[in-house]
Amino acid sequence: MSCGEDHDVDCGEILQRVYVFIDNELEDASTDEIRQHLEECAPCLDEYDIERCVKKLVHRSCGDEHAPDALRQKILLRLTQIRIETTSPGPE
């Protein structure tokens, strides 16, 4: 994924590390780098928000249980589809 803007770190690299960022498991330098990128890049910030919401929803619904990867991927795919449907212009 890329927003088309020039950043110090590529959007794809940021999104690969966003899961660890959400869990506060990064060193300070990486955390600052991701935070700065999210401030500058709306598409990555949107993806981060989705990931954070999914994580909270799963945690709230499952308690200490972890969702299987297949379920997580299905949920993320559906959320992406819904977001595309709601942001796409309708027929004119």
Image (cartoon, grey):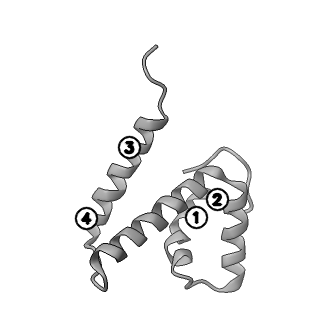
Image position of 56 (left or right of 72): right
Residue picked out by circle 4: 71
Residue 16 x %, y %: 51, 67
User: Of label 3 and label 4, which has the lower sequence position?
Assistant: 4
Quadrant position of residue 28: bottom right
Decide: is 3 above or below 28. Answer: above
3 or 2: mark nearer the eye = 3
Residue picked out by circle 1: 13
Image position of 72 (left or right of 10): left
Residue picked out by circle 2: 10
Query: Along the line of sight, which residue is nearer the eye, 27 or 89?
Result: 89
Instruction: Please state the total of marks drawn on the protein image.
Output: 4
Residue type, numbered disc 3: Ile
Quadrant position of residue 86: top left
Residue 5 x %, y %: 71, 47
User: Of label 4 and label 1, which has the lower sequence position?
Assistant: 1
Residue 1 x %, y %: 54, 51
Instruction: Label 1, secondary structure: give it.
Output: helix
User: Of label 3 and label 2, which has the lower sequence position?
Assistant: 2
Q: Residues within 10 Å of mark 1 (few under 14, many from 20)?
A: few
Answer yes or no: do the residues labelled 1 and 2 have beta carbons within 8 Å?
yes
2 or 4: mark nearer the eye = 4
Residue picked out by circle 3: 82
Residue type, numbered disc 4: Leu
Could you tell me which residue is drawn at 36 percent across and 76 percent down? Answer: 59
User: Of label 1 and label 3, which has the lower sequence position?
Assistant: 1
Q: How far apart are marks 1 and 3 (CA)?
A: 24 Å
Instruction: Label 2, secondary structure: give it.
Output: loop
Q: Distance between the residues labelled 2 and 4?
A: 28 Å
